[in-house]
Amino acid sequence: MSDDSIRVQPIGVIRSPHRDPAATPIQPVFATGIAGTVEVDRAYAAGLQDLEGFSHIYLLYHFDRAPATKLVVRPYLQDEDHGVFATRAPGRPNALGLSIVRLERRAGCILHVLDIDVLDGTPLLDIKPYVPRFDIRRAAHSGWQARVDEETAARRGRRDVAPSG
């Protein structure tokens, strides 16, 4: 490791009912109502001040059980290959995950969340508030995702049907 290496330390752990990667919803929108908790280490407790005023938060985490990095992947929502950076596939060069979840309540260092799509025991790297003023982009384009109809996305996103390929 060189002196200019990036070092990241977990600040807590994400708890959820998801134990099997193959059965875990692929995005929070497909995990509606699924409850979990975010256990933040006590050393970071002061950083949670005022978080309960937000309805949604971003969870940034380490895909600690991700498959090996592949630069070209076949995403769950489509039967075509795409570059990994045009997907949210977990087998990425830096194995970083991002989910927007609903913040139900805070109890000390425990955040009770809904719409969790993260495996139980996943290392938490950071939390950021979701702020519509900053985060919504009305003229955004969804690339290849725009070709996936809502029914197919919902079925595959909930893992009702295994992807082909």
Image: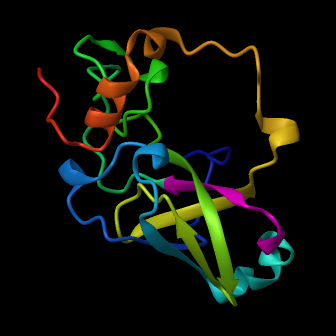
Residue 137, picture quadrant: top right
Q: Residue at x 48, y 12 (%)?
A: 146
Specify the principal SS of the magenta part.
Answer: strand
**On-image quarter of the C terminus:** top left
Residue 82, picture quadrant: top left
Q: Is residue 79 above or below residue 99?
A: above
For residue 33, side relative to residue 138 (left or right): left
For the record, the magenta segment spans 52-61
Q: Residue at x 70, y 85 (%)?
A: 43
Residue 44, picture quadrant: bottom right
Task: Please state the horizontal and vertical placement of residue 79, each as a whole percent of the image.
Answer: 22, 15
Q: Between 34 and 106, which is closer to the camera in this rendering?
A: 34
Instruction: Kindly tell me whether residue 8 is visible in this rendering.
Output: no
Q: Between 57 and 74, which is closer to the camera in this rendering?
A: 57
Task: Please state the horizontal and vertical placement of residue 68, each as a whole percent of the image.
Answer: 26, 38
Q: Is residue 142 above or below residue 16?
A: above
Residue found at the far front of this picture:
151
Q: Is residue 106 above or below residue 132?
A: below
Q: Between 135 and 34, which is closer to the camera in this rendering?
A: 34
For residue 26, side relative to residue 76 (left or right): right
Q: Is residue 90 magenta?
A: no
Q: Residue at x 17, y 29 (%)?
A: 163
For residue 141, side relative to residue 139 (left or right): left
Task: Please state the horizontal and vertical placement of residue 97, each as a whole percent of the image.
Answer: 49, 47
Q: Residue at x 62, y 46 (%)?
A: 5
